[in-house]
Amino acid sequence: MSARSGGGSSHCPLLQGSRRREPGGDASGFRTGASLGWGQGVLRTQGSQGSVRLSARSGVNRQNGAAIMGGGEDISAPEQQPTDCFVCRKHRGEVSIPGGAIYEDDLIYAGHAQIREGESTAYLGYLLVEPKRHAPGLADLTDAEAQALGLLAARLSRALKASEGAEHIYAFVLGDLVPHVHIHVVPRYPGAPREYWGVHVDEWPDAPYGGPQEMAALCARLRAYLREQRALDHSYL
């Protein structure tokens, strides 16, 4: 996966340091049936346009301000976030990504992958889904975080197909360079040659790349899709 979609020196989309290849070239348990405990999810718009707060059917019980998930996990007291973690800095608003948050609540965050330093474009539709709490890997997630991340990744995958015309969605978790777990949700668009399928999907010569404007417009379309689904099914987000 080309690091062109990355942005920042350490937060890579899949393989750091690769570039688009010419053909033939080298390249280096949450309780069953429990409703999702996302509380009040927020679909954010970028800049000063404000945010849309969606009331979701939730499995969260609040006791004295604490959020207790279905299995009795207390997720109300966030751990101290590292000051040098790129993902944590993004969640705190210290790093600006074109398009802003596509979805954000107390547990999870999703947005477009950033433009890599020294580049002017990113692979369009390359999304990252992350827990708000600093968790180094999958094994460090709570059951509530794991379910929330998986469900949001699935719903964003549907959005990429419906809104952007993706024909297939990849999901990767690597974690070799950034010690804050994040799911890469990456679309494959019609016309991608088979030799570029998988982690090299953003390297084919005609792969759709775009700058900040195109990224922001794509994120806006995904937010609109999630709103439409919410209107049809109030438990959606």
Image: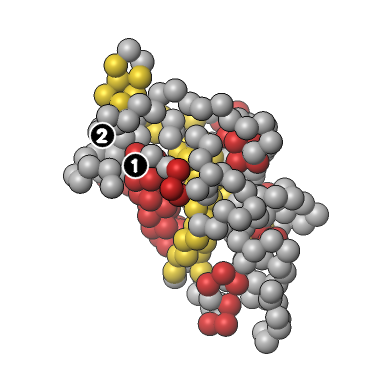
The image quarter in which residue 64 lies? top left
Left or right: 80 in relation to 162 = right
The image quarter in which residue 53 lies? top left
Farthest top residue?
64
Amino acid found under the numbered disc labelled 1 = Asp
* Residue 205, above or below 79: below
Q: Do the residues labelled 1 and 2 touch (CB within 8 Å)?
A: yes
Left or right: 97 in relation to 138 = right
Amino acid found under the numbered disc labelled 2 = Gly
Farthest front residue?
139
Question: Residue 85: x percent and y percent?
Answer: 64, 38
Secondary structure of the residue carrying tag 1 is helix
Which residue is label 1 attached to? 143
What's the mark number on residue 71? 2
| The C terminus - image quarter | top left
Quick one: label 2, few (<14), some, or many (20+) residues within 10 Å?
few
Residue drawn at 36 percent across, 15 percent down:
65
Residue drawn at 70 percent across, 50 percent down:
10
| The N terminus - image quarter | bottom right
Farthest bottom residue?
24
